[in-house]
Image (cartoon, rainbow, N blue to C red):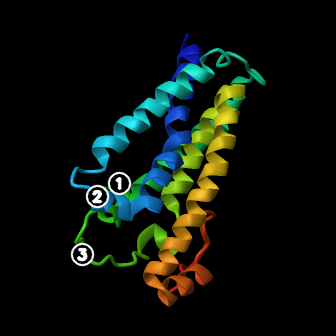
Amino acid sequence: MLLSFLCTFGWLASIVYATIPCFWLAIHPFAQFWRARRSPAYILLVPAWIALWIALGFTTAHYRHIALYHAPWTWLPAAALLLLGVWLYRASGRSFSLKLLSGLPELSSGAAPQKLIVTGIRQRMRHPIYAAHLCELAAWACGTGLAVIYALLAVGLVTGWLMIWLEERELVARFGEEYRKYQSRVPMLIPRIGHAPR
């Protein structure tokens, strides 16, 4: 009963995690378009994102019971990945407001200039939030063994890589040499262990 619930919950959670890059890709590359509109972008984007969850749910529902393996011990590494993801989210939020996380500054016309945040967890990795997303998605794939979640993980990895690549370009354009220096001393997704670079 519990495993059945976890598999269903993991499938639904993975749909959300796998589509986060799609939501981001609908915002950032088109930020100027959204800023020019009178109505807030989120009035259109959030319902569109939810519609994507529903469409992906219907598309994958038929296959959601196909398991690559059944092994209760896989929930041990899955739990470690889930906890790591939660820790990364918490560490990311200490120096990053919910407003920044949601992408609101990019959509606001006349927004105040942004400052490059390189404190806290960002002294050790450049994209801790995306690392947390991937940890959560990988945890559900590992624990459930469901083929559909592994497929969603693959989608999340491909679209996530595109999202990070575009964001890196955007940050270089926005912050210039300051961000290039940050790139050269801080890893992208795998945290630096030991003393944080200054």
Q: Residues within 10 Å of mark 1 (few under 14, many from 20)?
A: few
Q: Residue 102 shows which numbered tag?
A: 1
Of badges 3 and 2, nearer the viewer stands 3
Query: Residue 159's spot in the image, x, y percent?
Result: 61, 50
Q: Residue 99 shows which numbered tag?
A: 2
Looking at the rendered structure, the kind of residue marked 2 is: Lys
Query: Residue 180's spot in the image, x, y percent?
Result: 56, 84
Q: Residue furthest right?
A: 68
Q: Nearer the viewer, residue 84 or 115?
A: 115
Query: Residue 88's spot in the image, x, y percent?
Result: 48, 55
**Residue positioned 58% across, 77% down in the render:** 186
Q: Is residue 138 above or below residue 112?
A: above
Q: Is residue 175 visible?
A: yes
Label 3 and label 2: CA atoms lie apart by 13 Å
Q: Residues within 10 Å of mark 2 (few under 14, many from 20)?
A: few
Q: Is residue 124 visible?
A: no
Q: Earlier in the sequence, mark 3 or mark 1?
A: 1
Q: Are marks 3 and 1 in contact (CB under 8 Å)?
A: no
Q: Is residue 90 above or below residue 139?
A: below
Q: Which residue is mark 3?
A: 112
Q: Are marks 1 and 2 in contact (CB under 8 Å)?
A: yes
